[in-house]
Amino acid sequence: MPRHGEICANIAGLLYLYLQDQPEGRIVTNDSNVLIERDPDSVRGADVAYYSYERVPKGPLPPGFLPVAPELVFEVLSPNDRWSEMHAKIADYLTAGVQSVCVLDDSTRTLHAFYSDRPLQVYSAQDEFTLPEVLKDFRVRVERFFE
């Protein structure tokens, strides 16, 4: 769906601009596989994910699955997605070691931030989104993800 891709591009673009000034890590997009379990391997395809250089050092990414989970995953809720299915995906990410999973809902222009160590937080379009424990100085008004 073009709108889904547009929102993913906005997420990646905003993170990319931030990382140009704060080279703390890298982003991956296009359903890049996040390893959820081994033997048998089970993966989830994140819309956008962030890996710090502490988890995955600078340089070209190796082929195959990365042995660690990203710190941050963004998912964009499509009109045909069900929240029950999204909650299962979120649980998989958090169990695998992701610190925060952010779900953007275009129909309500909200960002739902799920954390491994604290309750859900919902941000409206006018709210400023920050995640200092993952991206130290990243600040963005939620509506920018939907422009």
Image (tube, rainbow, N blue to C red):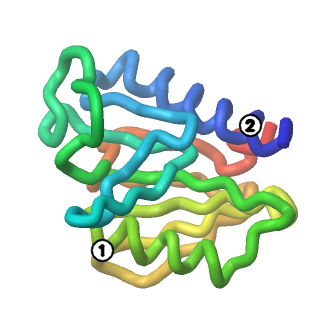
From the viewer's perspective, tell me whether residue 80 is left or right of residue 142.
right
Q: Which of 65 and 75 is in front in this view?
A: 65
Give the total of numbered labels: 2
Disc 2 marks which residue? 5
Circle 2 — which element? helix
Regarding residue 98, the answer to whether it shows in the image is: no
Q: Residue 21: x, y in percent?
A: 36, 18
Of the residues shown, which amino acid type is indicated by label 2?
A: Gly
**Label whose residue precedes the other's in the sequence (1 or 2):** 2
Regarding residue 26, the answer to whether it shows in the image is: yes
Q: Residue 127: x, y in percent?
A: 65, 58
The dot on residue 95 is: 1
Q: Residue 123: x, y in percent?
A: 63, 66
**Quadrant (top left/top right/bottom left/bottom right) for the C terminus:** top right
In the image, residue 97 sits, relative to residue 126, either above or below, namely below
Q: Residue at coordinates 44% horizontally, 27% vertically from top-left?
A: 18
Of the residues shown, which amino acid type is indicated by label 1?
A: Thr
In the image, residue 29 sits, relative to residue 123, either above or below, namely above
From the viewer's perspective, tell me whether residue 55 is left or right of residue 32.
left
Q: Residue at coordinates 32% horizontally, 63% vertically from top-left?
A: 36
Circle 1 — which element? helix
Asked where in the image residue 57 lies, by quadrant, the reply is top left
From the viewer's perspective, tell me whether residue 108 is left or right of residue 15.
right
**Quadrant (top left/top right/bottom left/bottom right) for the N terminus:** top right
Q: How crowded is mark 2: few (under 14 residues within 10 Å), some or many (20 or more)?
A: few
